Amino acid sequence: MALTKLGIRQFRNLHHVDFEPSEDLNLITGQNASGKTSLLEAIYFLGRARSFRTHRFDRIVENGQQELSVFAQQKLESGQKVSFGVKKAAKTVQIRINEQKITKVAELVKNLPLQLIHPNSHQLLEEGPRYRRQFLDWGVFHVEHHFYPSWHRYQVALKQRNMALRQSSRKELIQIWDKELIEAGMLLHDMRSRYVSELQALLHDYIEPLLGQLDISIQYQPGWAKDLAFEEALLQGIDRDRDKGFTGVGPQRADIVVKVSGVLATERISRGQQKILVTCLLLAQAALYNNKTAKKCILLIDDVAAELDPDNRYKLMQVLQGMEVQMFITAIEQGTLLPMRDFSSTSKMFHVEHGKLTDVV
Ligand SMILES: Nc1ncnc2c1ncn2[C@@H]1O[C@H](COP(=O)(O)OP(=O)(O)OP(=O)(O)O)[C@@H](O)[C@H]1O
Ligand SMILES: [Mg+2]
């Protein structure tokens, strides 16, 4: 799928932007503070109804304005066209798909899958497990129809169990929730674990050209001790859970561990290599989505050159060109984005200056 028309209103310094992106490669250049990241942020906002930079509405709405909106037309693989629109004010958000009001953001996310790679993406390796769970769940959500209902079921049971832990000292009243927790939790676990094996298999297609012969492994950690069943882990942890007032084991604690030659990636490879590794993970995830759904997700890549030497930049560009998905790639200078000399004839180049976008012919 690809976005064929895009409109942005009052989003940061983008007051009024309308453009027709290419269905494959879109290269966006501009000086610092011109509006490149804001442009990607606006597209991301259209697909998620939130920003990747902030949770605060007053930060993303153009200074002095009360409301922002982003809208687009999408062309599906079948050729069918779908329109999307997200309008946001301080206390309200309106989402429309084909002019129909949508109340669930999950519906939007499902229909407009976006993958973002930005200069801080390597946080995925450095920060807490929440980031890696989000990464994992983006992938599973988009390829397993049962993921979202199971996740929702699990969250409800977990909330009830945690409430019982805080309110009651009787084990029976807490363990009432265990059956549901285990059932929904095991569904999540099976989907996540299968997903990680599939991702691992694909990852090497990206590692090889970008990082060479590194021995990289991704281990999935379900959120409880590996040698126990979830049920046993819950039983063993009940006294600790009652002390603490929340459930200490389960899919809400899942993580993935990325290792290079058996050592944590963050402790083994350079920062530049970590950035490339995370890019490989995100690209493998996008490719897995494409393989499993016969649809294509959209890639947003901000400041692609940041911290990469010319050789690595060149290799990354080569790999990106092979992705055959719609991409929006930003850089300060055009030269950074070359050698994408052999762009397909359908690629487009845009220049941003003070929040205004122009086609570069
Ligand atoms: N709410 C807002 N209203 C108006 N302008 C804003 C708002 N928020 C940020 N800006 C401004 O928008 C401009 C564009 O920011 P953006 O981060 O998109 O730049 P950029 O082109 O990605 O720059 P860089 O190359 O430094 O990353 C900046 O000057 C910023 O101060
Ligand atoms: Mg930027």
Image (cartoon, rainbow, N blue to C red):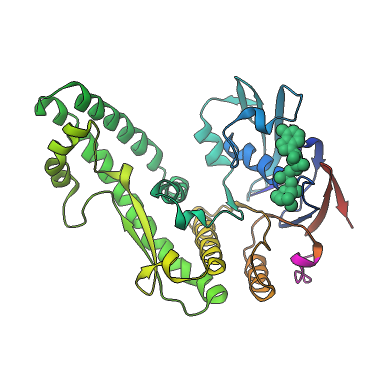
Image region (quadrant) for ligand 1 = top right
* Residue 255, position as x, y percentages in the image: 35, 52
Report the residue at 15% width, 22% height from top: 168
* Residue 225, position as x, y percentages in the image: 21, 53
- Against 270, is 228 above or below? above
| Residue 283 visible to the viewer | yes
Q: Which residues are magenta?
A: 335-344
Report the residue at 23% width, 30% height from top: 245
Quadrant the C terminus occupies: bottom right
Report the residue at 16% width, 28% height from top: 174
Q: Pick the residue in front: 92 or 273.
A: 273
* Residue 216, position as x, y percentages in the image: 42, 71
| Residue 98 visible to the viewer | no
Instruction: Answer left or right for 184 relative to 10.
Output: left
Report the residue at 64% width, 57% height from top: 325
- What secondary structure prevails in the magenta region? loop
Q: Is residue 209 magenta?
A: no
